[in-house]
Amino acid sequence: MKTSIFFIVTIFLLGVILKAAMADPTDGFTQVPISQSNFQVQYPYDVSQSDRYSFVNGVHKFWVYSTDKPFSPSSTTKPRTEIRITGYDYSSGTWQFEGNMYIPSGTSGVSVMQVFGGSSAATTAMLRVYNPNLTYYRSPVIISNVYGTWYRVNVIHNADAGRVQVYINGVFKYETGDNGDANHYFKFGVYTQDSPSNYMESRWSGIKVFRK
Ligand SMILES: *[C@@H]1O[C@H](CO)[C@@H](O)[C@H](O)[C@H]1NC(C)=O
């Protein structure tokens, strides 16, 4: 009798532990359909797209130089090669971006992922690289020594509650307030910030968008 109760309790606890271990930031979310047609590539206006972006074997590769032109002649923003996800702009609800990210050594002073739109700032969230770390804007550090390894990145934006969460490889890393109501969408690639390296590059695969 004692043995069988012990056995049942053990099985139950193993189940609880397994469920916790398998918990995923996308639990409870619904994936929305996405294809290349949802990806609008922005790149310096005086070059060809293929001079700054490639999509080979499912990997989006973005690169830009700190001396490059902005994405349009009328823009005064810093150089970028970015995908702006279209078709899922939002101003309410909870939305989640997922992608596998690779940053090569040397890339610095650059945003590699952003949640666009805010009322107190132009953006809600930015993941940036400052040699050798991945940071949330300037701080805190989200990944130290980010170079040369693939990471799964999940960014959750609850626009109703005004909160942003960042997960790396399925593990919760950071939560903070957003920057106010606006029209929002996700972007990823390389967008020059302060103290940039001459050459900036990021690679992304498995891009998914979820909502709740
Ligand atoms: C990178 O992260 C480490 C560990 O958090 C920190 O000690 C270091 O100051 C950071 N480097 C920069 C340039 O922010």
Image (cartoon, grey):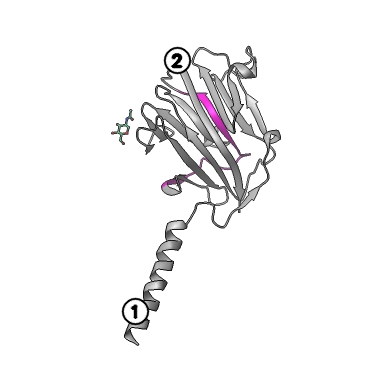
Residue drawn at the location 43% of the way across and 24% of the way down:
109
In the rendered image, residue 148, in percent from the top left (x then y), is placed at 41, 30
Neighbourhood count class around disc 2 (C-alpha, 10 Å): few under 14, some 14–19, many 20 upward: some
* Type of amino acid under label 1: Phe
Q: Nearer the viewer, residue 76 or 168?
A: 168
The answer to which of marks 2 and 1 sits earlier in the sequence is: 1
Q: Amino acid at mark 2?
A: Asn
Q: Nearer the viewer, residue 149 or 97?
A: 149
Is residue 118 at least partly visible in the picture?
no
- Magenta stretch in the rendered image: 173-193
Quadrant location, ligand no. 1 = top left
Q: Quadrant of residue 132?
A: top left
Q: Main secondary structure of the magenta part?
A: strand
Q: Is residue 169 visible?
A: yes
Secondary element type, mark 2: loop
Task: Please identify the quadrant where the C terminus is shown.
Answer: bottom right
**Any atom of ligand 1 within 8 Å of the CB at mark 1?**
no
Which marked residue is nearer to the observer: mark 2 or mark 1?
1
What residue is disc 2 on? 198
- Separation (CA) of disc 2 from disc 1: 63 Å
Decide if ligand 1 comes within 8 Å of the CB at mark 2.
no
Percent across and percent down for residue 95 are 59, 47
Position in image of residue 112 (x %, y %):
50, 30
Q: Which mark is residue 6?
A: 1
Tell me the tag on residue 120.
Answer: none
